[in-house]
Structure formats: structure tokens, C-alpha cells
Image: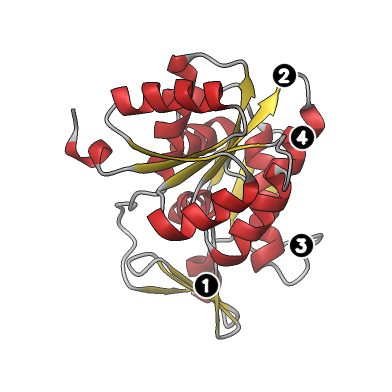
Amino acid sequence: MPEAVERRRILVVDDEERMVRFIRMNLEHDGFQVSEAFNGKQAIQKMRDVTPDLILLDVMMPDLDGFEVLETIREISTVPVIMLTAKGEEDDRVRGLEHGADDYIIKPFSTRELVSRVKAVLRRTEGISGSMHGLLEIDKRLKIDFDRREIWLEGKLVKLRPTEYRLLFHLVQNAGWVVSHDQLLQKVWGYEYRDEPHYVRLYINYLRQKLEKDPADPKYILTERGVGYRFVDYKREKA
């Protein structure tokens, strides 16, 4: 069992004890450390106590629902969150992603899907190796240091979630070139997400909201319709 996986701490939040036991048994079988919470208030307290590497968060809970818990988590942490949603509740899935969830799993789900999704999201939190080192000055507004995992906009540090950071890295790494939807899905999310292109569109929108002066008229992340996205060729523009 890989040592890196053994150290990963997962917080499971669901008011159904049988569901929590099922998830715990399967994650522990794969070497994860698992903590439990059975309502929203417990979840927030446990998050502070155990500092998990990832949270599995049910939507339907009696006191605070999953969306309310997620909003509170996002005020204090960028920890990856996977929402657990009921089958067919598409609005819940979209709402969860828009509120800052990193992924969702539809109930009922298989053991294989659960572990695969958890590992895929955790991969996005790991460091990125590449040829870009030192401070990259895109223009007077935007500066990026991938070594330090820092993005500076108009002199202020911008917080990016792990998935947003990885997406930005792959766009900037290919500045001036079009990166297709499929390439971004594979590089940022992994093979498991090959049939879910909406993730790319949603997270491109997140990045534009955080980085662009006018997200409706982007200058950094450009759309190549029907193909993919292109980060502005900042080196050529400076030449």
C-alpha cells in the first residue's frame, strides 16, 4: 500500500450511519484514514480538529444542508470537497460545483467509483512539475509564481482552489497554443472524467471571474470555439 495514500485523511459527512460505515470500510481498505461526522455542525468542527485532505459531503442533512456546510468550509479553507448527491438531482450537482465543490458522486455509487473519484481529486492537490520556474510576469496586472503556488493580481494574492490552479498551470504552460477540451480534462481531471466536458467550461469561468478585469471580455484566457482554450502569448506580446 503506497505510503502517500496512508497519510491521506478523509472526512465523511452523512446523516445515514450505514452510508458512513460503507464509505469508511472501503476507504480504509485502500489505506485512507477516515473521520466521521453525521451533521453539518459536526462536520465543521471535525474539519478544524482533524484538518482532512478531502471531505465527502452529503447534500441532504437535517440541520445544515451540504450547501450551507460547503459555504462555511470555503470561507476558511480550500480543502477538496466531493458532494454526495441523489440520483437525478442535476440541479444539486450544478449548485455544488458553483458553490466551490471539486466534484460530485451520484448515489448509489460503487466502491470502485468512490475510490477512483477520491484518488482523482487528491491528485489535483499534489504539486505540479514543469519547466516554468520563478516569477512569470504576464503583464502589469497579473504575476504568477508556480514554484511558490502564488498568483498576484494588482499586487494582491489571489486564492485558487487546487483544480483551478492546475487548470491555470496547463494553460500558461501552453501559452499561445490552443489546448483542447479533451487535453485539459485528461491533464487536470484525469481519464475518469473523459465524458464530462462541462467541468472545463465551469472552471474556465471560475478562473475568469478571479483573474480577468472583465470576465465577459477576457484578455488572458481566450476561447477557441469548438476546440478549446488558449492563454494569451504573453512572451510574444512583450517582444
Q: Amino acid at mark 1?
A: Ile
Marks 4 and 1, the one that precedes in the sequence: 4
The type of residue carrying mark 3 is Pro
Q: Answer yes or no: is residue 176 visible.
A: yes
Query: What quarter of the picture does the N terminus occupy?
Result: top left
Q: Position of residue 189 (x, y in %)?
A: 49, 36
| Residue at 81% from the left image edge and 59% from the top image edge | 216
- SS label for mark 2: loop
Seen from this angle, which residue lies furthest bottom?
155
Residue occupied by mark 1: 138
Taking depth in this image into account, of 76 and 234 the one nearest to the observer is: 76
Q: Is residue 73 above or below residue 34?
A: below
Using the numbered discs, state the Cα–Cα distance from disc 4 to disc 3 in whole angstroms.
25 Å
Disc 1 vs disc 2: which is toward the camera? 2
Residue under circle 3?
215
Which quarter of the figure has residue 95? Answer: top right
Residue under circle 4?
92
Please give the residue where the numbered disc 2 appears in the rendered image.
Answer: 87
Sooner in the amino-acid sequence: mark 3 or mark 1: 1
Q: Earlier in the sequence, mark 4 or mark 3?
A: 4
Above or below, comparing residue 226 to residue 145 in the picture = above
Please provide percent x and percent y for residue 186.
Answer: 47, 32
Decide if residue 68 is on the left or right side of residue 140.
Answer: right
Q: Marks 3/1: CA distance?
A: 17 Å
Query: Real-space Cα distance between discs 2 and 4?
Result: 10 Å
Looking at the image, is mark 2 or mark 4 earlier in the sequence?
2
Q: Residues within 10 Å of mark 2 (few under 14, many from 20)?
A: few
Q: What residue do we see at 69% from left, 36% from top?
A: 59
| Mark closer to the observer (3, 1) | 3
Question: Mark 2 belongs to which amino acid?
Answer: Lys
